[in-house]
Image: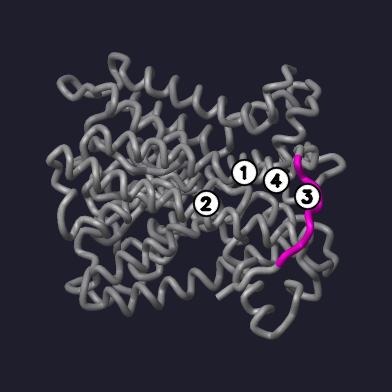
Amino acid sequence: MPRWLTPARGFVASFALLVAMGTVALQLPGVAKPGRELRWDEALFTATSAVCVTGLVVRSPEDFTVAGQGVIMSLFQLGGLGVLTFGFFLVILVGGRMSFFGRALVQSTLAEGPWEDFWPLLKMAAGVTFLVEAVGAALLMVAWGPEMGWLRAFGWGAFHAVSAFCNAGFGLHPASLMPWRGNVLVVATVAGLIIIGGLGFLPLTDMYDRWRSGRRRPLSLHTRLVLATTLALLIGGMIGIGVLEWHGALQGIPSDERAAAIAFQAVTPRTAGFSTLDYGRFTAAGLMFTVMLMFVGASPGSTGGGVKTTTLGVLAAAAFSRSRGHRRVNLWNRTLPADALASAVALMLSSLTLVLLATLVILHLEAELGGPFGGDGSFLKVLFEAVSAFGTVGLSTGITAQLGVPSRLVLVSLMFLGRVGPLTFGLALVDRGMPGDWQQPEESVMIG
């Protein structure tokens, strides 16, 4: 293995290669319907959105043939698992041996600490993925079968199940899931797939091992933090959406559908991208609240993006500990290492800076090129789009297709960085052999 090909570079290169292959595939004959062929920038945007499991689109799903829908589904399935993780698992499955390069990469992607023998974790990850997707596809087929016929329902069920579990947000209807807002089975199935896919493989494995062993051993700190933060965000999301949009996007919706819509819209900003409400009707407060949910995203080692639930959990725990006068961060009778807090702060600040810088660039480009979103009142919509791209969410107020090509390329970069950035950043922090890591004389500064 060449010295320059570090695990982080290999991971980024593999995603870039998959995006390039997807861009070419989406321009092949038979992928789009006659007269609706994709330009190069539209193919690049769609391929990046699929590989990075984002869900932002510049073309209607009705523009693609069944073959084109299959290409998109393959891209977000590979992107959700992580192309190298999936590849190394296949090597193990056929009896090959994994290199140290592969071991370091898979550890950084799926685990929060070193594993003595982690190939069973890879096997578990792929097994859980395909099993959960199969169950979800069957439930969606049952829900849609009487309405659209069983054969078509089978294809729709498989597509949406994979998209939901991978937190991709791609749908086959131009209005996402709004036509089935009152269908409890559809909404509950998609929401369940999103939550399971967003928890991460390590917590799922941890909970499964505890259930299988029959012993009441404690869950790992990572699993408990993921579950607690996820639950808090879901409850807080439902309260926020319900209060802020009761007289906004929820107005006019039958009362028996409002509760399901509120619950679903608290789930989907966690990098999923499906919607049962029209974000074009959201109030400014509702959009800003959704931006906050999208920025956090899913959990480490999951199919989702964002700065991750554990980052928010660590920062919240640090703030609570500091407010009580504690020098160290303690959670459930455990003390977090100083490196964990430093990593959380660095990731949060770098992500926030990147999103704000991209928003500024898009606003400037739209203003310079005479686009519709470079003037007054555009900031929140562009910020929403930028956070949706970086968090690999896919929710939109409907402005994606109206942006100019340069602005779309900024979103392409955001989607790519949002998908691979946290992983490569985390891997770089694990590298203890970096030069220049020595102790300097300490000197304090005033904070706050």
**Helix, strand or loop: magenta stretch:** loop
- Estimate the x, y position of residue 226 in percent, counting from the top left: 63, 63
Question: Closer to the N terminus: mark 3 or mark 2?
Answer: 3
- Estimate the x, y position of residue 90 in percent, counting from the top left: 68, 26
Badge 1 marks a residue whose secondary structure is helix
Callout 1 touching callout 2 (CB < 8 Å): yes
Question: Closer to the N terminus: mark 3 or mark 4?
Answer: 3
Question: Closer to the N terminus: mark 1 or mark 3?
Answer: 3
Residue beneath the point at 27% across and 38% down: 407
Q: Is residue 52 visible?
A: yes
Callout 3 touching callout 2 (CB < 8 Å): no
Outermost residue, top direction?
29
- Estimate the x, y position of residue 243 in percent, counting from the top left: 32, 79
Question: Hey, which quadrant is residue 269 in on the image?
Answer: bottom left
97 is higher (above) or lower (below) than 337: above
Bin the neighbour count of mark 1 within 10 Å (Cα to Cα): few under 14, some 14-19, many 20 and up. Answer: some
Which label number is shown at residue 425? 1
Question: Hey, which quadrant is residue 221 in on the image?
Answer: bottom right
Q: What are the residue bounds of the magenta stretch? A: 436-443
